[in-house]
Image (spheres, rainbow, N blue to C red):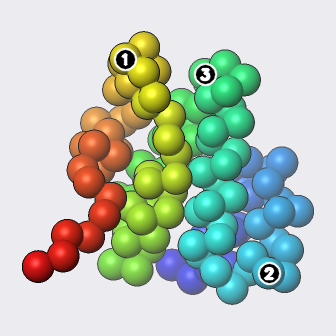
Amino acid sequence: MTPLETANLLTAEFPELALDLHAPNMLGSVYRQLDCFAAFTRRAFAAGRLEVLRHCFAVADNLLRHADHYLSNAINKVYLHGLHLDGNATNAHLISQLMPASLYQAYCRPHTTRLP
């Protein structure tokens, strides 16, 4: 999936991200787009917008399941690593309930590369 395709898919699901995702500095970088999407997800979480949050997770899960290696790597390193939603037990439980199982498994994996 190209950066333009990713931006278009996220914009179709979340029209409020259209200006941000189609900005010239974003169109060439899936990493920047996924960072923007992670920030949007964090804002939904902070505002208690659980349906939006659930939708964010469903879209991220769909992207991850259909991603090529490059996009999968970007989702794991940028989106999932950038969420920072499970700061306490209550939040961690909520996240585990709202995320699709496959996305939650990826979220729980360490997001850093181990050095030899």
Residue 94 percent across, percent down from the top left: 43, 19
Identify the amino acid type marked 2.
Asn
Cα–Cα span, label 2 and label 3: 30 Å
Q: Residues within 10 Å of mark 3 (few under 14, many from 20)?
A: some
Q: Residues within 10 Å of mark 2 (few under 14, many from 20)?
A: few
- Look at 28% across and 43% down and name the residue there: 108
Residue 75 percent across, percent down from the top left: 45, 63
Relative horizontal placement of residue 97, taking residue 39 as reference (left or right):
left
Looking at marks 2 and 1 on the same chain, the residue that comes earlier in the sequence is marked by 2
Placement of the C terminus among the 4 image quadrants: bottom left
- Dot 2 falls on a residue whose secondary structure is helix
Q: Which mark is residue 50?
A: 3
Give the camera-side residue of 44 and 61: 44
Q: Which residue is mark 2?
A: 25
Is 60 rendered above or below residue 68? above
Q: Which mark is residue 89?
A: 1
Identify the amino acid type marked 3.
Leu
Relative horizontal placement of residue 72, taking residue 63 as reference (left or right):
left
Looking at marks 3 and 1 on the same chain, the residue that comes earlier in the sequence is marked by 3
- Dot 3 falls on a residue whose secondary structure is helix
Give the camera-side residue of 83 and 15: 83
